[in-house]
Amino acid sequence: MNPEHKPDPSLHATLAAEVAMLERSAVAARAELAALYADLAQARVQIGDHPMHQLLEADRQLAPDALRAPELDALDALPNRVLLIDRMAQALAHARRNDTRLALLFLDLDGFKAINDSRGRQVGDEVLRMVGQCLVACVRGVDTVCRLGGDEFVLLLSEIAEAADAGLVADKLLASLAELATPGRVPVSASIGVSVFPDDATDAEGLVDCADRAMYGSKRAGGGCYRFFSALGSHPGDAQQDLQSDPARREERGTRLRDANEKLVLSAMAASAAVEQQEQMLAGLQTAARNKDEFLSVLGHELRNPLAPLLTTLDVLRMRGGGYETVEHATMRRHVFHMVRLVDDLQDVGKIASGKVELRVERVPIEHLALQAIALAKPLMEQRQQHFAFADSPERLACWGDPVRLTQCLSNLLINAAKYTPPGGSISLTTSRDGEQAVIAVKDDGRGISASALPDVFNLFFQERVDANSLTGGLGVGLALVRSLVALHAGSVAASSAGLGRGSEFVIRLPLIDEEDGPQAVRGSQPTVAALHPPRRVLIVDDNYDAADSLAELLRLYGHEVWVATHPVAALQMIGAAAPELALLDIGLPGMDGYELAALIRQENPGLQVALVALSGYGRAADQARSAQAGFHAHLVKPVDIEALERILQSVQPSPMPAD
């Protein structure tokens, strides 16, 4: 309401002093915000080198290897015994179902110990790696090449038509090994044993034993050749007898098995360490996300504190001027509101990123949405003397959504268009229907966007810098916020531009609903405050003297009786005598917080009919929920919206508070 009050010329000097003080405060606030911009810019530069981002990149590279580590040989990255057994089980099941054959080739390099002894371990390892690659190249992709350990390899031919096909593969292997260009031209040959399912054995263990016996038959023949188990004239059970009768062979087999098992244990340990490292990185990322949310919350609180007395003092000056505002005061008000909007955007981005945004969904007419957004952006367009055109759809369009959040999205686009369009430029807003979607387009003939920047315009903190002075008062969060909020409404937003200096267009698409669907009432209409209402007794408790004093003066101009306390102890001493109907309690008080003060007020004044309202720079859902649980009638975020406070003053019906 606007009580009649004529300006007193004698107050001119006082008002001039207050204006000067406000201007100094505004300059200091802008300097503080500029420092914040600089800190954020530095953070964006350094974010690429942050250890958490390096851990993320390492995690992306490590995860595939960690999953495969237990199944691959450490030297040549071929499948190890575990994977071979698994693939043999699959191949045997397939062969039994389809009545087909498969073959197992057991390959042992001839004279490999001499290569190791004469050329060294490094050359020997390189020879093994080259042999593994050669064997893989000789078989099909569906076949498996495995190094058992040392110089022994096993090849699983998953399906063959005839046993002779395995012999053709063995011939190919021997020929390729003979032509292998090893370090120092070391000649490579091998002894190969072949077993066939179901001719020689019907299980994996039997096939391996048969192929192993056949391989030793090739060794006895001089090496560099292959033998089928069926050509040896013995049975699978004879393999165990051969091991018992040949101690040297038994010892060699034991050594190979121990080496293979040791490598399996090491691989398992490496995989376990990789999983533990991933869990630690995930915990670190979760901690960083919590720290980020807390930082944004504290940042919003610290920025709101100096903004509250600025905005309230501007309201006081307007009331003292009979409801009129000077050009200078209007300019200051726009800049204060701009800073408040930046703080809100920062905190909204944090809420969306952590999934804490709650949408109050209802039926929203697109025309209503457009008019609300225009009302918010129009002052800036008028200030810059820009030409604005609104073309509404001839059809009545509506969507399901949160009217406040959708208005926030569209007003962001309109305000951006006004900021980046020069004075005298043109801006248009059109709404239309495209199939089952509502299309809302904001177009301007302003600065435009380069082709290289278009893919990034919706990224958080992104701002295209055309020249050293081209950034226009913002943090680069507005468009990121628009994209996230539109996505929450199952919609999309896109940007287009013909290039720098050629304007830009932003298009929001939202799913339509039928005209008759849903309730007709829509939230978000212009707030109204009753012209007359009874004065209230109000107690303000805030340790920020400027904020408390300016808010008290504003409420007095609205006809209320106001007391101010800047310390909770003083508030407890004052409340009995003042008997306020409503108490505004700052949550961040020294000595005891607002929640503790509220509990003591109830405890010490059980018969007092007072409604408690929380006042804080924190406005998260968790903060508002805590205030409600503590028995507060409402939760107001600094700087206080005087119309919202007036509505609370009208709606409060004080009643005794129950003691805790």
Image (cartoon, grey):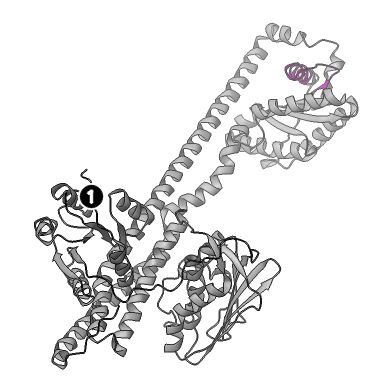
Q: Quadrant of residue 90?
A: top right
Locate residue 426, reporting x and y percent: 54, 88
Which residue is under mark 1?
Answer: 657
Locate residue 594, reporting x and y percent: 22, 54
**The stretch drawn in magenta includes residue 201:** yes
Q: Determine the residue positioned at 25% across, 86% down.
A: 322
Locate residue 508, reporting x and y percent: 59, 70
Q: Determine the residue positioned at 65% across, 12% down.
A: 250
- Say whether residue 176 is left or right of residue 24: right
User: From the image, which quarter does the C terminus lie in?
Assistant: top left
- Does residue 502 sit above or below 111 in this rendering? below
- Does residue 650 sit above or below 59 in this rendering? below
Q: Quadrant of residue 347?
A: bottom left
Locate residue 647, reporting x and y percent: 32, 67
- Does residue 1 sit above or below 7 in this rendering? above
Q: Determine the residue positioned at 20% across, 61% down.
A: 581
* Residue numbers of the magenta segment: 195-216
- Toward the viewer: 441 or 517? 517
- Toward the viewer: 187 or 46? 46
